[in-house]
Amino acid sequence: MTEVGVRGRPDGPGPGSGRVVVLGATGFVGRHVGAALEAAGYEILAVARRPLKTPASWRFRPMDLAHGDPEALTRLIGTERPVAIVNAAGEVWSPDAEGMRRNNELLVDRLLAALAASGARPRLIQLGSVHEYAPQPHGVWLTESSPEEPVSDYGRTKLMGSRAVLRAVRAGDADAVVLRLSNVIGAGTPRASLLGQVAAQLLAGGGDGAPAQVRVSPLRSSRDFVDALDVSRAVVAALRAPGASGRVLNIASGTSQHVRDMVDLLLAISGRRATLVERGTAELRPGADNGWTGVDVSAARAVLGWEPRRTPRDMVEDLWRAAAGQE
């Protein structure tokens, strides 16, 4: 398997790689993206609200992109002159609709204004979400032409951010690509996610040698889970692909996995004794299904020369290894 940074691939290093600003660099996806970019030969300038641990080779700039001085980002872009900016910042798990709007929509507006004011033209990689689409019936795959009718505050605010980026490209004010990510899994998966919750409960254990009680919402859906390392390779490829500007590209595994299978895989990989309890199953009608998501990635293959490489076992093993190492 060819890894990030191998010559002769779309995600390999090129001459004069330059500096990349990663917004939200201390978050789950941002950390993986920064690592892949550095491995591909780029200098990383990490931007985030809080100075959490980052590699010593990265430069770090604390900045509150949604609440702070909007001119600060303009000055940073004008001074640093990056070859690219990756927007991995935003809000995923907050129940606060205003927080979603501020961090997924207003933040993008500020970023685009800063780019325009700086006079710079770096390649902008906007990390969006497949939740920007309307839910599809079982067996209907999401493509870039699927209806954009999100049903959550998260999806709606991410869609507003993506549309703002695409308007800027059409107006000639930006060179940008929107990557719509499916459910990202890997080392550092947030505890607020389903598999993050399961890992945390396994680590907490049952005490006195008893099996851990792993309590989850009813496991009735199927989702497209993509490895964080595959996402990171897609970002590197999108940064370099000359024909990608103005495109929306889905980044996913191209398969749909039942969430129960993913939870069972995590339980097996952990090697921990556990009892799985699905909360509220008595209230569900027989055959109830909370949704199916499968994502077509053929456009990303064609435009970026990218394809997913890693399996569900790969991503769950990475998740568990990282979580268990933090005990």
Image (spheres, rainbow, N blue to C red):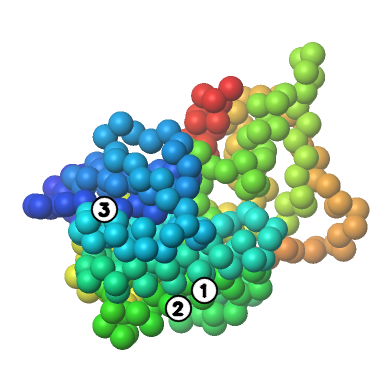
Are the residues at dot 3 and dot 1 in contact (C-beta closer than 8 Å)?
no
Question: Is residue 141 something that shows in the picture?
Answer: no
Circle 2 packing at 10 Å, graded few (<14), some (14-19), many (20+), is some
The outermost residue toward the bottom is 171
Badge 3 amino acid: Val
Q: Quadrant of the C terminus?
A: top right
Q: Position of residue 231 (x, y in %)?
A: 39, 53
Q: What's the distance in space between the residues labelled 3 and 1, CA to CA? A: 24 Å
Residue positioned 63% across, 35% down in the render: 199
Q: Position of residue 269 (x, y in %)?
A: 57, 31
Looking at the rendered image, the disc whose residue lies closer to the viewer, 3 or 1, is 3
- The residue under label 1 is 159
Circle 1 packing at 10 Å, graded few (<14), some (14-19), many (20+), is many
- The residue under label 2 is 163
Are the residues at dot 1 and dot 2 in contact (C-beta closer than 8 Å)?
yes
User: Looking at the image, is mark 3 or mark 2 earlier in the sequence?
Assistant: 3
Q: Quadrant of the N terminus?
A: top left
Residue positioned 58% across, 57% down in the render: 92
Residue 80 against residue 316 in the figure, above or below: below
